[in-house]
Image (tube, coloured by chain):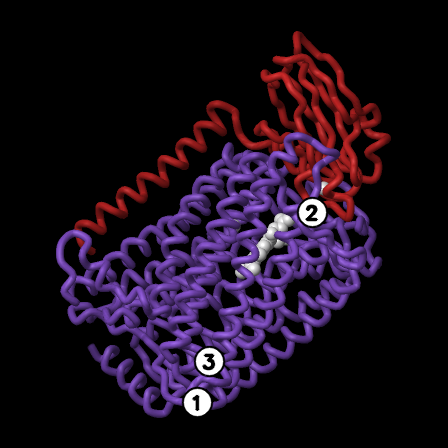
Chain colours: A red, B purple
Amino acid sequence: MSKSEMIWLALSFGMLMAFMLATGYQTFALEMGPPSHGETIDPQKVDETAPFDQPGIKKIGENEYEVVMTMQIFSFNPSDIEIPAGATVHFILTSKDVTHGFQVAGTNINAMVMPGHIQKITQTFDRPGEYLVLCNEYCGAGHQLMSTTINVK
Amino acid sequence: METALKESYIQKVNRYMGLQREDARISKSYLFVAFVALLLGGILGLLQGLNRAGMLELPYWLNYYQVLTAHGVLLVLVLTAFFTIGYFYAGLSHTLGGLLPKVRKMAWIGFSLKIVGFVFAVIPILLNQASVLYTFYPPMAASPYFYIGLVLIVLGVWMCAFGAFINVAHWRKNNRGQNLPIFSFFATGVFVLLFFGSIPVAIEVFMIIPWAFGWVETINVMLSRTLFWAFGHTLVNIWYLTAVSAWYVIVPKVIGGRRFSDTLTRIVVILLVVMNIPGGFHHQIVDPGISQEVKFLHVFMSLSIAFPSLMTAYAMFSVFERTGRKQGGKGLLGWYKKLPWGDVRFLAPMIAMIAFIVGGAGGIVQSTNQLNQVVHNTMWIVGHFHITVGTSVILTFFGITYWLVPYISNRTLTPKINRLGVIQTFIWTVGMLFMAGSMHYVGLLGAPRRTSYTTYGESATAMGWDPFMILIAIGGVLLIVGVLLQVYAVFHLMFRAPKGKTEFPIAEREEHDTYTPYWTERWGNWIVIMLLLIAMGYVIPIVDFTINAPPGSPPIKTW
Ligand code: HEM
Ligand SMILES: [Cu+2]
Ligand SMILES: [Cu+2]
């Protein structure tokens, strides 16, 4: 192996390690890891199971909200959410039928929502405006219609 | 030295005798199917591009997701699988001194199984009974015949993998102590991955079939999704390893140079094979139910694969530089002018390699957690794989056809078709720059993938994506021109071009590169290491998904 190749490979290795370290630091030290909630639920009994028996938005602290939401073809429940600017929102999500994707355009909210699993994701909405919420996993013939909004006032 | 002599002896014999007629027929049939799939898949791709730009409303009897399912199946299953097998079987025959009669028969059985399987899968798609996309995530349930078709396709692939193993084992028995010819070494790696990588999807489909028939009530959604990606992720790297084989073995010959270090080449193959499969969770980074530690491990494994790729980048540029200098290129960069840019057999794979630098960088970035959350399931991802598969892999395949098709058809590449190929490469490159470039950008703005034209009720955000969707459609129009030129070139070279002998261009080693350690041949060891790594990546999560599974889901048809 030539010297230039050794140097190239050492740099490559260093770069990949830097990526790993950055990812690991973010995930485990800063707790900014990807949504990975572990709780499960009977996908055929979502309506009878707490907290999804009462989907909706609830104030749980100083400008802090909890949104319990079900996704089903081809809608979000609750929909058209309104919150004040600066609010931190904890979303608790599950699906009543097939796999959906929960995405809010213009934010980092992006999580798979699968039947049988409860997913959680948190976001602080600093900038006022109307955010587009959409399903980003193909879920059937009306998938392209599955959207709602979050209005930050 | 002895190996080198032996290799060139076989090559000489083959040069004079040509590829045995019957072996050639196998590869020809596989390539024929591959390029019919490109034609059909390309047309469907154009429909998608036009639809997403709001320029084309599909008729009521043709659903966008039906089209997308077919586009996916035709291009990432049929085109790639048939090309890979046709290409490697031609090379196995060439470098191992012909296929064994038994192996030939297996290749044909494999061919029939795949075609029958494809018909089984395609009829429900046409009837809108299987609009589940090529990932078919349960609990969406297609007609059971769709899955039966998939099983037959997998069996057909296994048949070809075993055929390759038998031929390789036969050669090794007759050539004890020698290193496998380099092309066949690549082929072995690819078929090992094809076999082991498709086991998870076979298990998944065997879980699905009784459920789709209604014999079993529910299915474990998370387990099936995970099994799918253990396969899907591997498949991606199989195409990539196939393209890499041409970069290491064929391209140096085309430019009049010699191969990069034989030992290092083999190490790259071994690394790509053993580290490959346990990376599938990078497709599931934002899934629930998978711990962050397991996701992190898979991100690590995915990034590890970048290491042999970076070795490859060095190898390729070192071969180019050395060859260019030998041919009189001067100065720091003068050598690149000496490369045969007007030869499509070089130009297409060269652009493919450059595309891989871009695609690879995008891949590294998007497998890190936070950035994945930005781009997951957006058009960015669609842009990413049109660069990696749609350009890097496919342009390499296109470049291969300009010598492989004449070689198996006993015809020659004329300057006219070469020029056509250069134009085709240019159109493809520009088309992909438009299409994949805009896809990346509009994905960052939030546009989701796998979604037909929509304004989400006149949402200002969604309407802001439209200009980029129009660029995607423009790219799509260029690409369909590229598809037509390429398909014309392949069929012309197969049936019309002037008769004559074409060489299978395998580069020789460097003169001083005479020794390759025999331990590289220990495939048994590599497979054991591979299985250990797979166990490390998958045993804990799969046990967890099975034991702690929520109640399953019944089949649902939502389209
Ligand atoms: C004429 C050339 C092509 C055009 C115009 C085209 C266009 C498209 C478009 C617009 C989509 C996105 C649809 C969406 O997510 O809503 C798509 C998806 C896709 N394309 Fe292509 N494409 C072309 C060639 C290829 C090639 C050569 C390959 C691979 C070998 C390929 C593989 C795929 C795959 C795997 C998908 C994703 C399917 C899915 O999400 O289920 N395409 N294509
Ligand atoms: Cu959806
Ligand atoms: Cu992958």
Q: Which chain carries label 1?
A: B
Residue B409 or residue B54, whichever sits in front: B54
Q: Mark 3 lies on which chain?
A: B
Quadrant of res B245: bottom left
Whole-percent x, y for residue B212 in the image: 79, 58
Q: Is residue B531 visible in this depiction of the protein?
A: no
Which numbered tag is attached to residue A63? Answer: none
Q: Residue at (69%, 31%) from the top-left corner?
A: B459
Do circles 2 and 3 both sit on a common chain?
yes
Residue B68 or residue B244, whichever sits in front: B68
Which numbered tag is attached to residue B452? Answer: 2
Check disc 3 and report the residue beneath it.
B493
Q: Is residue B471 visible in this depiction of the protein?
A: yes
Please state which of the two labelled residues, at mark 2 or mark 1, is closer to the viewer.
2
Do circles 1 and 3 both sit on a common chain?
yes
Which numbered tag is attached to residue B20? Answer: 1
Residue B385 or residue A68, whichever sits in front: B385
**Mark 2 surroundings: few (<14), some (14-19) or many (≥20) residues within 10 A:** many
Q: What element carries label 3?
A: helix
**Mark 1 surroundings: few (<14), some (14-19) or many (≥20) residues within 10 A:** some
